[in-house]
């Protein structure tokens, strides 16, 4: 009879034990799948009422359904003295642990602009279980109402806003999408300024389209949850083409659509943007290969700010009829290019003026001076952006 | 029979891979808090010191061809050699503790959605008891397995974080005082115990051409890797780096594909974690090796069991006292590292000369 190799068997058993334990060590999926536990917050809105913070969470709850409608979305509100306290109230109301790991959107209500926004946002930087990836935005009115809005395109408010603030939208230069990381870094940089999209909701008439539904039903409330006021009216659509700016954590104003566009050209990696230009004949230029930004140079011991932008232009459309041969030519006339440059410079100048007036360094002049000309920063840093000497260098080239 | 023979290649890998793996968890965050944008400078300074002392010990090993135990025994007698090895056993045991707690917290934070019980970390000890009972040869072999895992995962994580890096955040170099860099060196000093590790390897490998240089360079490459990860970490998070614990799990989360397909970067973190676990277990293996010399009996299973029992007791006693562990590590263990990984290796050169004079007499 073959003798058993005890050492070998022990080693194999040990290896099996270690493998089994490794699964326990590395995963947390051995518990029963509890639908209530798997409910996740996909978006959160925060409003401030005096000393009280109100957090409204849009929660996705998987449903054990055979009808195809396998996810339900509800808005739940919690109030407390801090964000953590308010989230704990949500926990108490619903019984599930609010997992912010899946939170993709954070909307600050207009009431948050009254104080320092970091009194609210600090929680997200402190909490180890929250990533800094959620997109942050401020909205007109109440964030709770915004999240409870019935959307014209049939999605939840979170999904709609997320789509409007997507990376693709950011590349079009129309929205100034930022996440918690960018807001935190900008605010803690020498510039002490940050910005975020400013969302406006506008109501649509009933004929404006059907609610898709799909696998979701929005607006269902739980307990004394919020949002009924928002869902009582007509269907909503959102506009995110303005930008709220903050200095030292405090609200410093809202940039117009044109200023927001200029900000996006300079701060974001935009790919394909459109800009109207011209005086008598109006053209819309399509710009690709955009390269824009801010440089700080030293001129005679004084900092000089240079704002630069270059792109390849094509005429996307003209407000008059043109013959096919002239369209196929593809070359943008010099006067149109110059008109395009003037339009862009004008928007940038409006942006800089607006930021100078509000004392907000959203373009990061002080940070650039600190990083690249530190000795000058110590002397001139405090005077920026209000005393900045700014020059513009805009260059459009014809694609043809 | 316990095998303690290593090749120069294995030592090089241990110095490079294990030396770097154990420093990728909390170390970049603590350095960010101490030195800000100059965190990489502090890491490089400590790396240079460690590499120099590692080179010194390798050179001593080549010149004498004996283990550190034999060297001390010749110079100061067997009892002193045993006492010194007992000190090293204790030193390696406590050296394992701080990174082990960091590992525990990292696993809890990165792999779990909510705070789990400390009990889920107990399987680590089952693994540690087993690995700790193996000799140094085993440590060398596992290091060879860990090398490709470590290289590929670190490379992947760095690539995933590349798009989010703003390296201008590392500027300016002149805004911070050199004293802050030195303070950072002090806080992270306990992690640079390469000199002590090399003392245990002394006499356990066959010297080859330029082996001292190769081992010292490997130690330097490990340190440079850590400095590079720390620089990327700062480039991703800038001033927020000080509140982002467990750097290696955080640098890649902004990778665009993650928002679509989930935390795929965690696969790389899981794999890297294997190298990290082995790097922690190396300390237990070294402590176990030191105890075999102290008691002159190769009862490594028992030593490993006892060492891990102490670690379990410490883990329970100091559960939720992470700040205290860090503070003790950077102060008490820092001094112990100075003694065990820098002063004693230099003293070993003195013993070499003493032994030489005695032989001549």
Image (cartoon, rainbow, N blue to C red):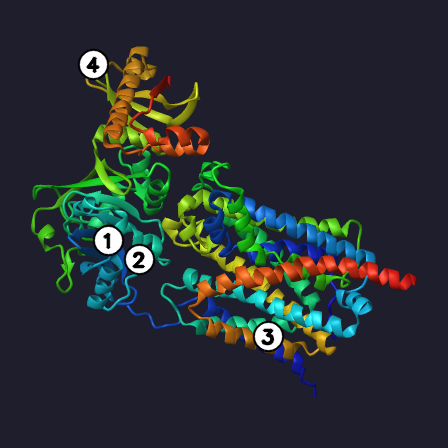
Sequence-earlier tag: 2 or 4: 2
The x and y percentages for residue B297 are: 73, 79
In which quadrant will I find the C terminus of chain A? top left
Closer-to-camera residue (B310/B352): B352
Question: Residue B307: which disc?
Answer: 3
Q: Where does the image place residue A335, in percent across and percent down from the top left?
A: 29, 11
Q: Which mark lies nearer to you, 1 or 4? A: 1
Q: Which mark is residue B323?
A: none
Rendered residue at 43%/60% (across/down): B110
Which residue is identified by label 2? Answer: A100
- Confirm whether circles 1 and 2 share one chain: yes
Chain on which label 4 sits? A
Towards the viewer: A161 or B128: B128
Front disc: 2 or 4: 2
Report the residue that reaches farthest toward the right.
B361
Residue at (69% x, 50% y) in the render: B52
User: Residue at label 1?
Assistant: A44
Q: Point out the tag, 1 or 4, that comes first from the N-terminus.
A: 1
Helix, strand or loop at disc 1?
Answer: strand
Q: CA distance from mark 1 to mark 2?
A: 9 Å
The structure residue drawn at horizontal position 30% and vertical position 31%, both measured from the top left corner, is: A263
Estimate the spatial distance between the alpha carbons at disc 2 and disc 3, rounded to whole Å.
39 Å
């Amino acid at each position: 009879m073959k003798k058993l190799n005890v050492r070998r068997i022990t080693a194999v058993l040990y290896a099996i034990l270690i493998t089994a334990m490794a699964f326990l060590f590395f995963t947390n999926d051995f518990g029963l799948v509890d639908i209530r536990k798997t409910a996740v917050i996909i978006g959160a809105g925060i409003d401030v009422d005096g000393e009280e913070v109100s957090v409204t969470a849009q929660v996705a709850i998987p449903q054990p359904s055979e009808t195809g409608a396998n996810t339900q979305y509800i808005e739940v509100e919690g109030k407390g003295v801090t964000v953590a306290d308010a989230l704990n109230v949500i926990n108490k109301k619903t019984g599930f642990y609010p997992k912010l790991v899946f939170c993709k959107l954070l909307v600050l209500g207009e009431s948050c602009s009254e104080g320092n926004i970091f009194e609210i946002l600090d929680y997200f930087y402190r909490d180890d279980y929250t990533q800094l990836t959620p997109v942050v935005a401020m909205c007109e009115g109440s964030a709770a109402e915004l999240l409870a809005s019935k959307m014209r395109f049939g999605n939840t408010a979170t999904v709609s806003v997320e789509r409007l603030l997507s990376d693709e939208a950011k590349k079009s230069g129309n929205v100034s999408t930022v996440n918690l990381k960018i807001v935190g870094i900008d605010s803690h940089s020498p510039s002490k300024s940050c910005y975020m999209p400013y969302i406006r909701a506008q109501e649509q008439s009933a004929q404006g389209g059907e609610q898709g539904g799909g696998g979701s039903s929005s607006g269902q409330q739980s307990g004394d949850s919020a949002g009924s006021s928002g869902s009582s009216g007509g269907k909503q659509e959102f506009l995110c083409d303005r930008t709220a700016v903050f200095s030292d954590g405090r609200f410093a104003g809202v940039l117009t659509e044109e200023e927001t566009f200029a900000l996006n050209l300079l701060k974001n990696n935009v790919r394909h943007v459109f800009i109207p230009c011209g005086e008598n004949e109006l053209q819309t230029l399509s710009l690709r290969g955009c390269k824009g930004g801010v440089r700080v140079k030293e001129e005679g011991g004084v900092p000089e700010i240079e704002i630069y932008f270059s792109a390849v232009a094509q005429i996307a459309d003209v407000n008059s009829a043109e013959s096919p041969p002239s369209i196929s030519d593809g070359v943008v006339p010099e006067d149109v290019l110059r008109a395009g440059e003037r339009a862009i410079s004008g928007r940038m100048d409006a942006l800089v003026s607006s930021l100078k007036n509000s004392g907000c360094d959203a373009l990061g002049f002080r940070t650039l001076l600190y990083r690249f000309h530190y000795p000058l920063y110590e002397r001139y840093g405090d005077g920026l952006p209000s005393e900045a000497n700014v020059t513009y260098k805009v260059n459009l080239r014809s694609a043809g | 029979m316990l095998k303690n023979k290593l090749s120069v290649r294995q030592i090089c890998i241990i110095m490079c891979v294990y030396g770097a793996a154990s420093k990728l968890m909390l170390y970049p965050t603590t350095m960010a808090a101490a030195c800000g944008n100059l965190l990489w400078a502090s890491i490089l300074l400590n790396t240079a010191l460690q590499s120099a002392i590692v080179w010194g010990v390798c050179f001593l090993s080549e010149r004498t061809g004996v283990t550190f135990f034999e060297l001390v025994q010749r110079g100061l007698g067997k009892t002193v050699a045993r006492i010194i090895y007992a000190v090293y056993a204790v030193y390696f045991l406590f050296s394992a503790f701080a990174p082990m707690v960091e590992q525990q917290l990292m696993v809890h934070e990165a792999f779990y959605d909510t705070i789990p019980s400390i009990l889920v970390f107990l399987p680590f000890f089952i693994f540690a008891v087993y690995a700790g009972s193996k000799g140094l040869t085993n440590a060398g072999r596992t290091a060879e397995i860990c090398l490709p895992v470590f290289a590929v995962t670190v490379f992947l994580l760095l690539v995933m974080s590349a798009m989010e890096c703003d390296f201008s955040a590392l500027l300016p170099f002149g805004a911070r005082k050199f004293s802050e860099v030195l303070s950072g060196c002090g806080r992270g000093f306990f992690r640079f115990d390469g000199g002590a590790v090399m003392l245990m390897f002394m006499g356990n490998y066959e010297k080859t051409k330029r082996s001292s240089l190769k081992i010292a360079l490997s130690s330097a490459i490990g340190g440079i890797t850590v400095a590079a990860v720390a620089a990327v970490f700062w480039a991703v998070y800038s001033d927020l780096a000080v509140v982002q614990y467990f750097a290696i799990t955080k640098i890649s989360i902004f990778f665009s594909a993650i928002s679509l397909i989930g935390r795929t970067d965690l696969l790389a973190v899981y794999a890297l974690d294997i190298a990290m676990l082995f790097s922690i277990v190396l300390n237990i293996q070294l402590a176990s090796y030191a105890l075999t010399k102290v008691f002159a009996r190769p009862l490594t299973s028992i030593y490993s069991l006892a060492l891990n029992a102490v670690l379990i007791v410490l883990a329970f006693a100091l559960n939720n006292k992470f700040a205290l562990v860090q503070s003790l590590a950077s102060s008490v263990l820092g001094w112990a590292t100075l003694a065990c990984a820098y002063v004693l290796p230099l003293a070993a050169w003195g013993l070499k000369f003493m032994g030489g004079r005695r032989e001549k007499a």
